Image (cartoon, coloured by chain):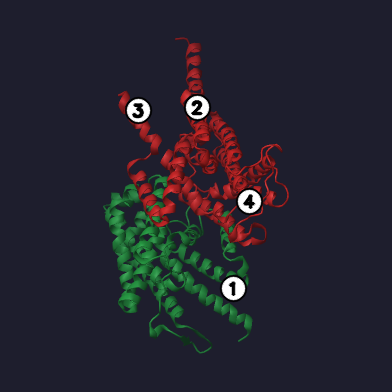
Amino acid sequence: MSGTLGALVSIGFHGLAFAMVLYLISVGLSVTMGLMGFVNLAHGAFAMLGGYVMTVSMTRYGVPFLAALGLAAATAALVSIPLERLLYRRFYGGEELDQVLLTMGLIFMSVAGATYLWGPQTQHMQPPDWLAGQVDLGFRSFPAYRSFLIVCGGALVVALWLGLEHTRFGAQIRAAVDNLRMAQSVGINTSRLFVLTFALGSGLAGLGGGLGADLMAINPTYALQYLVYFIIVVAVGGLGSIRGPFFAALFIGIADTAFKYYLPELGAFFIYALTMMLLLWRPQGLFGRA
Amino acid sequence: MSSEATRAATVDAFARRHRFRAIEAAPWLLALAVYVVFPRYLPLGAQILATILFVLSADLVLGYAGIVTLGHAAFFGTGAYTAGLLAANGWGEPLSGLIAAALTAALVGFLSGLIILRATGLALLMQTLVVATTLYEAANKLGRWTGGDDGLSGMVVWPIFGMFRFDLFGRTAYTYCLVVLFLGWLLARQIAHSPFGRSLTGARENTSRMHAIGAPVARRRLIIYTISAALAGVAGALIAQTTSFVGLTSLSLERSGNALIMLIIGGVGRLYGAFIGVPLFMVAQDRFSKIDPVYWYFWLGLLMISVVVFARGGVLGLFERLWGLRRR
């Protein structure tokens, strides 16, 4: 295989893996913004929580990989429920300034809390033996863990989309996003819908944080450090969209990997500039409604 | 009452709102007292004064025009780097540095405003963040000029008017910041009470109705965004010139976020929120973050949540409520 083609395949592969993690984390943010009209800047804190639960339970307590993954998602979802009930729900559809301050406050507390509980250093995740090394696909071999990431992420995306189309819960979410008052009028319990959706989004974020622990380093400032990535995915994908963020994540994951490969000295600058251009063209994002 | 008299009364009512009240002299008298009583704290005092100007500029877009921004540091940093680059490359004249900073920041504000002010609400909020991050990353990667992560050093700032040297005790810096803040405050006050300022508040409260009475809402939002950017740029330049250093943090999300926090602590849309929130925040930060930065973050986060949940309107809002109770 020629060098250029090899590099392109490599960029596509790693970009795809990054995109899966970005999507899993950001989709909950997009839905919270579209459905509840709430800008949850602290969304990344749930991903961080998942990442910590995953890495710490594996390294300190020897929990097996898949169980740790489940634990990460469950913890993030469970922690998000009381927060939603006690804090978030008071501000649904309210003033953005309040939401921003509330969630920035939560970010700060998450930074302090993570430092207190797990120390300031980065947590490393050791993939299990069956995911170490490479898998050979005939024409080329790929790192096994990243391949697992793509397969696992892809399966979740398909499950999420099918669930949204074909389950009663999914139909309720779609109805509420389209027209909240009408959904309430036909008897959908939106308060319950909100808390379930919020927990689902947070759980997916926890899962993404855990799965992507080797791509996005788990440290106390995680929620602040990667906030812009999550925000960009939602801004480019379009608020409230479930599919939009997927294509946005794909675009950002692959573009970011490509720029870092070819122009490492410019780092993430191009991604931001590209996002600006895209928003100039479509202010409401790719799949957003004006 | 004749219509003539009604008219006069109405005009008088508006004029009264604009007239200077005795209490408005309080922050300035206090600032002068600090100069005399706490000579050792003047360097911190100068930083506080410049930050008040920055937060005041944020109040113009946030409190009056209702544009919630998470990227106001973009303009602060632009101003700081403009003044810093001039002083580091052989032009250390401070006043022209301020003007240059105001102009470049205004240009950045105007251009980014053209793009992002078309959006509203959450989309707008996210886009302000993206603008600031783009600039942050640009400054980070243009290390040859900006010094990147290490910050821009080697600034040589000349004496003001060729006479007042920036001294070690911060006397010149303090006075300089105080005078510039005073001028900035006069401008902001003028804007807030002008028909232009009232129409911004109108657009914040009900955009469609302002459209309906024929107000050019989009243009006015762009104008205030540009003016506010210029003021923020001046604030950045002040800090750059008085500390002879510009770091990447001047463009960071943390700075934008802190401006919001200080504003909300003081009170939004009241013109004086910055004068209360900034000193409280910065003195507390100066005391506590040295002891333990992690716990500072914890308490800061808790404070923000409590303010949002319990004390909307900040310190000034509390005062207004107490005042209201007393009068009842």
Left or right of A187, for residue B266: right
As drawn, the chain in green is A
Q: Are marks 1 and 2 in contact (CB under 8 Å)?
A: no
Q: Position of residue B121 (x, y in %)?
A: 46, 47
- Give the residue number, with chain letter if any, for mark 4: B81
In front: label 2 or label 4: 2
The disc label shown at residue B25, or none: 2
The amino acid sitting under disc 4 is Tyr
- Splitting the image into 4 quarters, where does residue B99 fall? top right
Tags 1 and 2 on a common chain: no
- Closest to the camera, between mark 3 and mark 2, is 2
Which callout, 1 or 2, points to the residue nearer the camera? 2
Numbered mark located on residue A261 in the image: 1
Question: CA separation, marks 4 and 1?
Answer: 29 Å
Circle 2 packing at 10 Å, graded few (<14), some (14-19), many (20+), is few
Residue positioned 54% across, 70% down in the render: A254
Dots 3 and 2: beta carbons under 8 Å?
A: no
Q: Is residue A205 above or below residue A149?
A: above
Work out which residue is located at the far bottom of the displayed protein and give it.
A138
Chain where mark 3 sits: B
Q: Chain of mark 4?
A: B
Badge 3 amino acid: Trp
